Image: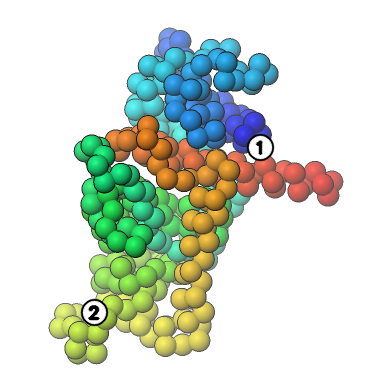
């Protein structure tokens, strides 16, 4: 399966790359080696060794580890990975779902890690050290919008960055961590009705003394109806999305020891997202061949 997933990513990367200058290694060559490492859950040093490649897949120009480490930090590499991600999203039509869900997933590291970019915050079951992946899912194998942040950055803060980037319009489901008036207004501006469980009542019917967002009042009203209850139940689907992602071969498991510092975490997470999209594309192609 690793071979097939890599082939899909490599083909898209070569098609979308726009070589320029006189560099010995194109950006597609750099990402080809990086994807080979990611699909096997190995560090870039492993992928830079020719003996870890089958003869029929090994690129003619295989960048050394020092080149991989340097080029993976450059904006051009991130831009190409993002272009591949957008292309995969378009191919699997993941952005057309009327109901989208936002949540975060802890990416914890050891409590004694010296990573200066890791923060302490609320993770699964208690306080943890590391980063957190904030993502919006729309029913597909890939998040529609996402972003990593230190563990101590709140869901509300990251939601302010993610909501304006969402495609389409409809309902955005969330838990009580997102029950904040500014987020309802932000979602409305993006064409979405944010539906979040109301925070615990603190007098005055749980609405406080301030003027309330029309979106928040609508969410509270929706949750008293059968339709709103059904929407709220769909929010649990994001746990399945994360669960499927982390339990699949080549999926996003705990951060390995060589993925530290924010830039490496971001590249690793994005590559894992691309692997998930390639997996869905592979099975779609197999399904078409079976019924051809």
Mark 2 and mark 1: span between their CA atoms? 51 Å
Above or below — where is 34 with respect to 88? above
Res 40 quadrant in image: top right
Judged from the image, the secondary structure of the residue bearing numbered disc 1 is loop
Res 140 quadrant in image: bottom right
Task: Rate crowding at label 2 as few (under 14), some (14 to 19) or many (20 or more) other CA atoms within 10 Å.
Answer: some
Query: Where in the figure is residue 158, as x and y percent of width and height?
Result: 30, 55
Q: Is residue 275 left or right of residue 102?
A: right
Query: Is label 2 or label 1 in front?
Result: 1
For the N terminus, which image quadrant? Answer: top right
Residue placed most toward the observer, 239 or 188: 239
Residue at the spot 49% in from the left edge and 75% down from the top edge: 233
Q: Which residue is mark 1?
A: 1
Q: Which residue is mark 2?
A: 212
Query: Where in the figure is residue 51, as x and y percent of width and height?
Result: 57, 15
Residue at the spot 41% in from the left edge and 61% down from the top edge: 102
Task: Rate crowding at label 1 as few (under 14), some (14 to 19) or many (20 or more) other CA atoms within 10 Å.
Answer: few
Residue at the spot 30% in from the left edge and 38% down from the top edge: 262
Query: Where in the figure is residue 97, as x and y percent of width and height?
Result: 54, 62
Q: Is residue 131 visible?
A: yes
Residue at the spot 19% in from the left edge and 80% down from the top edge: 211
Judged from the image, the secondary structure of the residue bearing numbered disc 2 is loop
Query: Where in the figure is residue 291, as x and y percent of width and height?
Result: 83, 49
């Amino acid at each position: 399966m690793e071979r097939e997933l890599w082939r899909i990513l490599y083909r898209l990367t070569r098609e979308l790359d726009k070589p320029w200058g006189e560099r010995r290694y194109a950006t597609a060559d750099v990402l080809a080696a990086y994807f080979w490492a990611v699909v096997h859950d190995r560090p870039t040093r492993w992928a830079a060794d020719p003996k870890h490649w089958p003869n029929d897949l090994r690129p003619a120009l295989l960048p050394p580890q020092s080149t991989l480490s340097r080029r993976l930090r450059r904006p051009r590499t991130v831009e190409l990975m993002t272009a591949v991600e957008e292309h995969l999203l378009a191919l699997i039509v993941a952005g057309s779902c009327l109901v989208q869900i936002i949540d975060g997933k802890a990416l914890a590291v050891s409590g004694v890690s010296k990573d200066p970019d890791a923060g302490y915050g609320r993770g699964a079951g208690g306080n943890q050290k590391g980063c957190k992946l904030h993502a919006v899912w729309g029913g597909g194998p890939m998040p529609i919008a996402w972003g990593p942040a230190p563990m101590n950055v709140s869901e509300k803060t990251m939601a302010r960055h993610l909501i304006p980037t969402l495609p389409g319009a409809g309902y955005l489901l969330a838990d009580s961590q997102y029950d904040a008036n500014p987020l309802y207004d932000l979602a409305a501006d993006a064409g979405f009705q944010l539906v979040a469980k109301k925070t615990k009542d603190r007098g005055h019917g749980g609405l406080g003394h301030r003027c309330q967002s029309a979106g928040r009042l609508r969410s509270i009203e929706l949750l008293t109806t059968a339709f709103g209850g059904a929407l709220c139940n769909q929010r649990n689907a994001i746990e399945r999305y994360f669960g499927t992602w982390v339990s699949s071969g080549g999926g996003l498991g705990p951060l390995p020891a060589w993925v530290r510092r924010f830039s490496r975490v971001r590249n690793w997470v994005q590559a894992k997202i691309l692997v998930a999209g390639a997996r869905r594309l592979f099975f779609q192609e197999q399904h078409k061949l079976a019924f051809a």
